[in-house]
Image (cartoon, grey):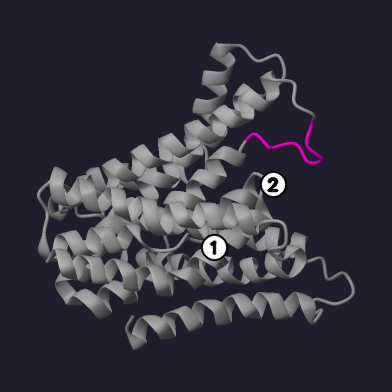
Amino acid sequence: MTIAVFHKLLVIFGTIAIGWIAIRGRWFGRDNDGAALSRALGDAAMTIFVPALLFRTMARLDLAAMPWRVAQAYFIPTVLLALLIYGWLHHRVRHAARSGAPAAPIPTPPAAPAIRTLAATYGNGVQLGIPFAAALFGEAGLAIHLALVSLHGVILLTLITVLAELELARTAPATTLLDTLRKTLRNTLIHPVVLPVVAGLLWNMLGFGLHPLVDTMLAGLGVAVVPLCLVAIGMTLAVHGVRGKLGDALRLSALKLLLLPLLVLATARWGFGLDGLALKVAVMMAALPSGTNALIFAQRYRSLEPEATAVIVISTALFALSATAWLTLLAQLA
C-alpha cells in the first residue's frame, strides 16, 4: 500500500465524514432530514451528473485503441459472477415467496437482488482506482486501467439496470409476459444510465465529436459525481449506521474483495494467457472496493440504502488489507 493510495483512502473517508457531520451537526436547520437530503443528492447524481459522465465517456471513447483482450479477461468473469449472484439472490426471494415463509418485518424490495449484485461486482475504479493504478503501475498500467474504467459503467450499470427494471416490471400487478418485456425495454432505454450510453455511442460512431465548450461542461458535471455520492454516503450513515447490516455488508464485501479478483485472475492468466502488467492491472481493478453507484441505485429504487452504504464503507476500509494480499500474490506469480 503506497502513501498516495493511503492518502486517497483518507480523502474518501474524510468526504464521507463531511456528510455524516452535516447531519449530526444539523447544518441544514430544524428540518434536518438526513434520509431525504441524501436521496436528493443521489437523485441529482443519477439524473444530471452520472448521465453527463457516461455520455462524455462514450462520445470520446477510442474503440480502436481499446485493449480488448484485457477487457474480455476482466468483463467475462465479472459479468458471469454478476449473473450468478443475481440468480442466486433472485432464487432465494422467489423460494421464500413460494414456500409460504412468514413475511419479514420489511418485505424484500423487487430491485434488492440487482442492488446487492451491483455492490458485489462494481468497484471504485475512479476516485480510488486511478491513483492506485498510477502509483503502482505507472503510465502504462494507468492506460490499461482507464480503458477498463471506460467500459466499467457502460457494461455493469447497463446490466444491473436491465435486471432491476425486469424485476419491477415482473412484480407489477396483472402483468403478462408481453407487458413485462415491453415495460422492461421502455424503462431500460429511458433510464438515466442506459440512455446517455446509447446516445454517446451513437454520437461517437457518427463522428460528430464534442465542441470544447460542451466537453468542458460535461467534464465539470462528471467530476461532481464522486464527491456528491460520498457526502450522500455520510448522510445515510449518520441516519442509519451499520447496525443490523454488518453481516450482509461483510458477505458482499468478501465477494467484491476476494471472489471477483480470484475469478479475474484465473480467467486472465489461464484463460487468456495474460501476464505481467496487464494481469496485475486487471486483477487489482477487480479487487477494488464497492463503488458509490451502489448507493445511487439503492436511492433510485428506494431500497437497501443503509446496506449499500455499509458495503461501501466496510469494503473500502478492508481494501487496505485485501489489496496488500493480492499484490503479494501477484508478485509471487510473477
Magenta residues: mostly which secondary structure?
A: loop
Pick the front one: 314 or 68: 314
Where, by quadrant of the figure, is residue 148 drawn? bottom left
Q: Residue at x 49, y 48 (%)?
A: 118
Residue 157: x %, y % from top left: 44, 46
Q: Foreground mark, 2 or 1?
A: 1
Residue 312 got which mark? 1
Structural distance between the alpha carbons of marks 2 and 1: 17 Å
Q: Is residue 73 above or below residue 136?
A: above
Q: Residue at x 42, y 41 (%)?
A: 82
Question: What range is drawn magenta here?
Answer: 103-110
Report if residue 308 lies within the magenta region: no
- Within 10 Å of disc 2 (Cα), the crowding (few <14, some 14-19, many 20+) is some
Q: Residue furthest right?
A: 30
Residue 302 got which mark? 2
Q: Amino acid at mark 2?
A: Arg
Q: Secondary structure at mark 1?
A: helix
Q: Amino acid at mark 1?
A: Ile
- Position of the N terminus, as image quadrant, is bottom left
Q: Are marks 2 and 1 in contact (CB under 8 Å)?
A: no
Q: Is residue 178 above or below residue 310?
A: above
